[in-house]
Image (cartoon, helix red, strand yellow):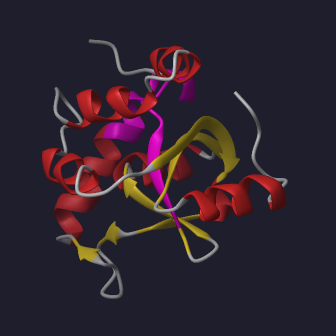
Amino acid sequence: MDFSLSTAQKASQTHQLEQWVHRYLNTGEWKNSSLSDGLKLQTRWWFGPVRVSLDVLKRSCGPEPHMEYVQDPNNWSNRVTTIADSLTAIEHLPPLIVQYRDGSYSIRDGNHRYEAIVRKGWTSCWVIIWYDSLADKNYDSSTNNFLESN
């Protein structure tokens, strides 16, 4: 299955975004089954895909010691370089999966892609945002102006 921006947009338009996310996380090149399993532990609210400025996103994974998921610097760099070298258009990538958490946007899937996008010199990307409560979703949707609709 194609996990591009266009298939995510179609899933969103047909109210199938959560199903798209789980298929994406359990299939193919970008597989992250453990995230899918964790997401299924409670109800989530989904929004997107939306285009956002890179500066509003926070990585949760990388070689820096303060990261939630610390990676070996060489493995990190090699993977990011491979992805960056293959990028031709932001629309060809699956949207990053981001958690709204305490007023910020934490990248939960797509940290390597994010860094590759930064290295390409691009300034925005497409994301799918999940919220752990309807109150967070309603608050975020009504107060943040940097989100661009799909």
Quarter of the picture holding the N terminus? top left
Is any atom of residue 82 visible in this view?
yes
Residue 133 point in image, percent of width and height: 51, 62
Residue 2 point in image, percent of width and height: 33, 13
Above or below for 90 versus 100: above
Q: Is residue 98 magenta?
A: yes
Residue 135 point in image, percent of width and height: 63, 64
Query: What residue appears at the point 17 percent right and 27 percent down from the top-left corner?
Result: 27
34 or 117, nearer to the observer: 34
The stretch of residues the image draws in magenta is 83-100
Query: What residue appears at the point 80 percent right and 59 percent down from the top-left corner?
Result: 144
Quarter of the picture holding the C terminus? top right
Tell me if 61 is positioned left or right of 75 in this view.
Answer: right
Q: Is residue 78 magenta?
A: no
Query: What residue appears at the point 54 percent right and 24 percent down from the top-left corner?
Result: 12
Tell me if 26 is positioned left or right of 58 in this view.
Answer: left
Residue furthest toward the bottom? 66
24 or 11, nearer to the observer: 11
Tell me if 70 is positioned left or right of 50 in this view.
Answer: left
Query: Where, by quadrant of the figure, is residue 25 drawn?
Result: top left
